[in-house]
Amino acid sequence: MSFSQKWETHKQNKTGRRWLGLALALLLATGAFFSGLQLGQAKADNMISVKNQTASLLGSFFGFSASDKAGVAKKHEADMTEFWEVWNLLDKKFARATSGDKLTPEEKIQGAIEGLVKAYKDPYTVYFPPAEAEEFDENISGNFSGVGMEVGMRDGVVTVIAPLPDTPAEKAGVLPGDVIVKIDDQSTEGMSLDEAVKLIRGEKGTKVVLQVYRKGETEFIDIPIIRDNIDIPTVKTEQVDDVFIISLYSFNAVAENKVREAFKEYLNSGAKKLIFDLRGNPGGFLQGAVGIASYFLPAGKVVVKESFSDSSKDQVLRSRGNRIGNFNPKNTVVLIDGGSASASEILAGALQDHKAATLIGTKSFGKGSVQELVELEDGSSLKVTIARWLTPNGTSISKTGLTPDIIINRTPQQRLAGEDPQKEAAIRFLHGEKVESETLEDKLNKTSGE
């Protein structure tokens, strides 16, 4: 069943609350993938079952008496006096440009909720007013076109996680780590992730111009991109001597099956060594990461831990034990970089902690959180971070990301020229050569061409 079909089935059976582990906002392509996307009914170890609940936040402001409001404030240990004072002052004193500028009570409440949500300073916790909530639903059903890249927030700025292979973004020269400064002459300063996604996405055949800051460059770079429908790749295989290479580009609905087919090819190839390439992979289904980890790890080994604010809800997801070989740090390499996020980090972290592989490349992006999408009474919705992912050894994936066992840099110039020192280093390592981690000085020398 395709992603769109699964989503349609899910929408028909939804009960008002949906569990999403979002990879990073929305994939800017014809499909949207979410790290740990959990659809439908509760499933064994990797799904939390909840009853249908209707959010009553709006009810706390409309139709309540003064004593009711005081009761709500007391319940939440918050004094709402100042809120209502500001509400009344704005009503009395705000000078409107035109009579049409008058806000409805509903619009005021929506603005107040947006401010409350932003106070948490989490780029993945977002409030969607009714119209935006409906658009969000349409977007995650996959019925849109775009440029074929994933973006996230890093240090408060909109940053490219990774362009997907053979997409308009990659062909135009967008690189992982590019900071998006402007979108069609509109500054991204103070812009939310979802606002940026909305501006970048558009109809097939239309143009969007991204102005980016790129490390090592002295000036901003303008990158024009023609939007298109995106065929999202999943797996590619190749063989170099006795080294078999599996490149996984996304943890979509078919990733686990595609990787299983690639492993069959690997077993039939006669190769004794494996490179599993997760560079530029922004994540996808959490179940896919657990299933693929099961090809590497014995049954029962921890793949990832989900840490909730309520520790009684903590989850431990384990390998299913579908291991197809004896993988270890001498015969297996996992490649990661700053474009490896979410489900990619879960898989790489599990293999690193269980000593099933050697990690080579650069630090991963650091997106390790789970979001829940809650539908509110008025048609709006709240996407809220409810849990954090930890590696088997308890390392938080969020913000810091994973550090490779061997750091090998790849400069923007090398990417654009098609040079791949990370893959070359992995092949040398698997052939028994000693490969040392590079220092910051090595990276600067590469960038300067020395």
Image (cartoon, rainbow, N blue to C red):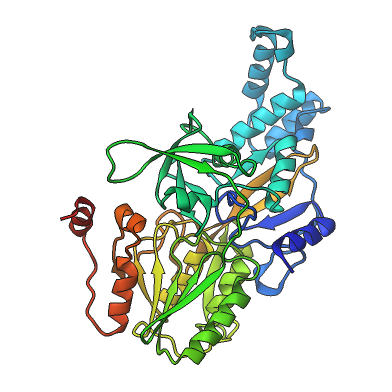
Q: Nearer the viewer, residue 180 or 206?
A: 206
Which quadrant would the N terminus be assigned to in this image?
Answer: bottom right
**Whole-percent x, y for residue 387 in the image:** 58, 57
Find residue 419 and report its image quarter.
bottom left
Instruction: Count the marks.
Output: 0
Residue 420: % across, % down? 33, 65
Give the left or right position of residue 286, taking residue 56 as reference: left
Task: Look at the image and tell me in which quarter the C terminus lies.
Answer: bottom left
- The correct choice, above or below, for 424 with respect to 337 in the image is below
Residue drawn at (58%, 37%), measured in percent from left and top?
199
Q: Is residue 299 above or below residue 40?
A: below
Looking at the picture, tell me which residue is in the foreground, 398 or 3.
3
Q: Is residue 316 among the parts visible in the rendering?
A: no
Q: Position of residue 127 (x, y in %)?
A: 65, 39
Q: Nearer the viewer, residue 74 or 427?
A: 427
Residue 178 position (above or below residue 31): above
Residue found at x 47% / y 65% = 345
- In this view, the residue farthest toward the left is 450
Compared with 1, 319 (above or below) is: below
Q: Quadrant of residue 4?
A: bottom right
Residue 430 in sight: yes
Residue 35 in percent (x, y) is at: 58, 60
